[in-house]
Image: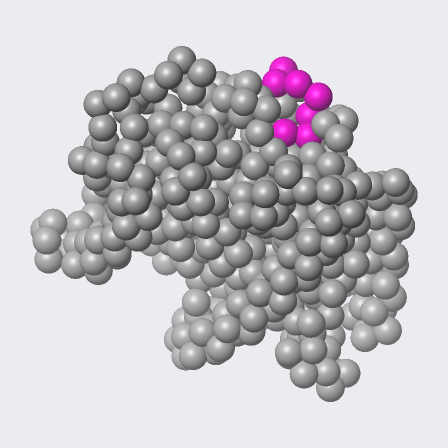
Amino acid sequence: MSTTLIISVLVAYFGVLILISYLTSKNADSETFFTGNKQSPWYLVAFGMIGASLSGVTFISVPGKVQIEGMAYFQIVLGYVLGYIVIAQLLMPLYYRLNVTSIYEYLNQRFGAVSYKTGASFFILSRTLGSATRLYLATVVLQLFLFDDLGVPYWLTAVITIVLIWVYTFKGGIKTIVYTDTFQTLFLISAVIICTIIIAQLLDVDLFGLYDRITETKSSTGGSMTQIFFFDDPNSKLYFPKQFFGGMFLAIAMTGLDQDLMQKNLTCKNIKDAQKNMYSFTTVLIVTNFLFLLLGGALYVYAEAKGLSLPMNGDKVITDHVFPTLALNHFGTLAGIFFLLGITASSYASADSALAALTTGFCIDFLNFNKREEHERQRLKLYVHIGFSILFLVIILLTKLYVDSNPGTDLISLILTIAGYTYGPLLGLFFYGIFTKRKLTEWMVPVICIIVPIICYWLDKNSEQLFNGYKFGYELLIVNGLLTFACLSLISKKEILIASNEN
C-alpha cells in the first residue's frame, strides 16, 4: 500500500469519528459524559462492546499465536461465557439496584470509604496499564507501515494517536463512545472476515477447504493448528481447566468489575436491556474470536504455500508482526485497507472507552463530583481527561522501551498476566461483600490488596519448585482473588450490617 493511500484512509476514518462525536455531543453535560443520560439502545451497546473488549492486541496477537499453540485460546473464550453469565445474573442487578455511576460506589456502601478508594485505585491501575499497552500495538503498526517512511519519530506517532482519541471523546464521553464503538466494531469484524475470504481465494479453496488446510498444518505444540482442547499435561499453561476457569474469572474481573465495560451497560434504560446486551455481546464475541483463530491459521497456511519468509527474531517467529506484514504486503489493496481499518478500529475502540471510564472513575470516586456545580464539573472533567491522556502517552512510550529490550514479547499474554495481579484484589473485595455480611477493619484493606499480589508473584516465579513442576497460567487470578478473600476474613468483624446496606 502506498503512503498516500494509507493517509487518505486514516483521514477519512477519523473524519467520520469526529463527525459522530459532533452529532452525539450536542448539548452534552457531565451527566451525558458519565451515563449517556441512560438512553443508549442495548443492541448498540452490545455490538460496540465487542470492539472495546477485543482491542488491537486481540486483532494481531490472537491470530499470531495460532502457530505456537493452535486454537487453545478458544478454551479461554469458552470460560468467558460462564463469566458473562455471572455478570448478567449477579453483578449487573446489583449495580442497577444501587443506581451507581461508578461501580466502586458499591464498596463504599458495603464497607466504607477506604475499601471504596482501594477498589477504585486498583481499577485505575489495571485499566491504565492494560489499555495503554493495547494502544501501543496500534502505534507500532502505524509507525512500521506509515510514519517510518515519512521520517516521523515514534514519540510523535504516539502523541498523534492520543490526541486523536482525546478530540472525539472529550465532550460527549460515554454517549459518543457507544456510537463510535459501534462504527469501529463494524470495521473490526469486517476486516477479519474479508482478509480470511481473500486468503481462501488466493489459495483457490472455499472456507471449508481452508479449514481443512489449517487442520493439516502443525503448530509448535505438535498437534493440528485447529486443536482447541488440551487435557494431557496439568503442568502446561494450555491445560483446559486452567484456561477455562482462568477465562471465566478474567471475564468477571475484566468486564464485570471494570468501570470501562460496565459503564456502557449502565447507560442502558433498565436491567432487562442491560442483560439482553450482555447475552448478545457474548454470542457475537464467541463467533468473532473463532474467526480470529481461523484467520490466524490461514495466515500460516498461506505463508507456507507461497514460500514466504515470516518476520523472525533469531529462530523465533515474531507472531505479532505476521498479520500486518502479510496483509499490507501480500494480500492486495483491499485486504490492506481493511487491515488498516481493523487495527485502527480495534485499538481505538478499546482505548477511547477506557479513557472515558478512567475519567469517570476518577471524577466520581476521588473528586466528589456529585457534590459539585455543573460549571466546576466541566472544568475538572477536562483536566482529568487531559491528565489520563498524558498518562496513556507515558505508558505507551515505556511499553515501547520494554518490548524493544524484550523482543518477541507476547502482548496478549502480558496483558492477561498483568490482569491476574491487578484484578485479583477487586475479585476478593467484591465477592467478600456479596457473599458475606461482615464488616472489615478498613485501614488494613489496602495493605492486604497490595501484599496479596506480591505473594502471587512470588508463587508464580517459584511454582515449579514448590508444586512439583506446576506452572501457573491465567488461573493465578483465581488464586489472587481467593487469597484476598481469605485475608479479608482475617480482618473482618462480627457486626451485622444494617438492613439498608445489605446485599
| Residue 294 as seen in the image, left or right of residue 313 | right
Residue 328 sits in quarter: bottom right
Q: Residue at x 41, y 75 (%)?
A: 406
Inspect the magenta stretch and tell me whether residue 268 lies in it: yes
- Colouring used for the render: one colour
Please provide percent x and percent y for residue 247. Answer: 40, 38
Total marks drawn? 0
Please provide percent x and percent y for residue 423. Answer: 40, 45
Along the line of sight, which residue is nearer the eye, 142 or 229?
Answer: 142
* Residue range (magenta): 266-272
Q: Residue at x 63, y 67 (%)?
A: 390
Residue 24 sits in quarter: top right
Say if residue 480 shows up in the picture.
Answer: no
| Residue 93 as seen in the image, left or right of residue 245 | right
Quarter holding the C terminus?
top left
Quarter holding the N terminus?
bottom right
Task: From the image, give the main secondary structure of the stretch colored magenta.
Answer: loop
Task: Reply above or below: 487 against 149.
Answer: above
Task: Reply above or below: 181 against 131.
Answer: above
| Residue 468 as seen in the image, left or right of residue 179 | left
| Residue 54 as seen in the image, left or right of residue 185 | left
Outermost residue toward the bottom in this view: 151
Q: Residue at x 42, y 59 (%)?
A: 414
Along the line of sight, which residue is nearer the eye, 84 or 78?
Answer: 84
Please provide percent x and percent y for residue 342. Answer: 70, 53
Please provide percent x and percent y for residue 291. Answer: 59, 42
Task: Reply above or below: 216 against 387.
Answer: above
Q: Residue at x 45, y 33 (%)?
A: 108
Say if residue 38 shows up in the picture.
Answer: yes
Inspect the magenta stretch and tell me whether residue 105 lies in it: no
